[in-house]
Amino acid sequence: MTVALRARVYNDRMSATPAPQAEPRGRNRRGQGERLREEIVDSACRLLDELADDQALSLRAVARDIGIAATSVYLHFADRDALVLAALEHCHHGLVAAIDVVEQAAAGNPVAQLRERTLVLGRWAHDHPGLYKVMHESTLNRRAAMAFKEEFGRLSRAAVQRCMDAGLAPADDAAVVALDLRAAVHGAVSIRVNQPDLPWPPLEDQVDRFLVKLVGVKAP
C-alpha cells in the first residue's frame, strides 16, 4: 500500500469512527499542562510512524487518539508543523540517550563505540520506518530548520576523532570522514526502508564494511 493510500485509508477510518467521549479534564493543575503536552507528542510519534507522512497527520486525529478536544492541542502547538517538529525532536533525544548507553558500555574501545552508535541509528530506522521517513525524507526538511539534527553530526565527528586519536584509524579530517560514514549509513537505511523486500545482508555486516572502507579501521 502506498503512503498516500495508507494515509487516505487512515483518515477515512478516523473520520468514520466516533471520537471517544473523554471526561472533561477541567482546569489543569500545576504540571498537568506539561503532561498533556507529552501525551500529544507521544501520540504524534505513534501516528507519524504509522502514516510515514507528516502532511497526512492532523491535529484533530491526535486529539481523537488521546481523547481530548482539538482546541487542547492548539493550546500547545500552533500548527501541524510545530507538532511534527516537537515529535521528531522527542525521537532525537531518545536516540541520543540510546547512543549514550551503548557508548558507555563500550567505554575504552573507540571503534566499538563508533560501531555500536552507528547500529543504534540503523536499528531505530528499521523499527520505526515511518518516523525515519518523516525525519529525513519529508518536505518538512525544506520548510523548517531541524537544528537538533546537527547534534548527530557533532557526535559522529567526535566518535570518529576518538578512533583517530587512539591510532585505530588513519589521521584525517574527522568531519569529512564522519560525513561520508553518515551518508553511507543513511543510504543503506533509506533503501532498506523503501525497498524492504530486497535480499538485504545483515546491517551489521554493511556497517563493518563502511567502517573499514570509509574510516579505515581494521576489520572486526
Image: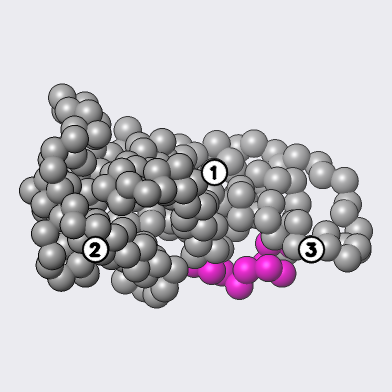
Pair 2/1: label in front: 2
**Viewer-proximal residue, 169 or 88?**
169
**Whether residue 33 is situated above or below residue 4 in the rendered picture:** below
**Whether residue 144 is situated above or below residue 1 in the rendered picture:** below
**Viewer-proximal residue, 104 or 194?**
104
> In the image, is 118 to the left or to the right of 180?
right
**Residue topped by disc 2:** 165
Is there CB contact under 8 Å for labels 2 and 3? no
Q: CA distance from mark 2 to mark 1?
A: 41 Å
Q: Which residue type does callout 3 highlight? A: Gly
Which picture quadrant has residue 60? bottom right
**Residue topped by disc 1:** 46
Q: Quadrant of the N terminus?
A: top left
Pair 2/3: label in front: 2
Q: Which residues are magenta?
A: 72-82
The residue at the point 54 percent across, 43 percent down is 46
The x and y percentages for residue 39 are 69, 51
Q: Which residue type does callout 2 highlight? A: Asp
Question: Going from the N terminus, do you reach mark 3 or mark 1 first?
Answer: 3
**Viewer-proximal residue, 176 or 1?**
176
The x and y percentages for residue 26 are 91, 58
> In the image, is 176 to the left or to the right of 6?
left
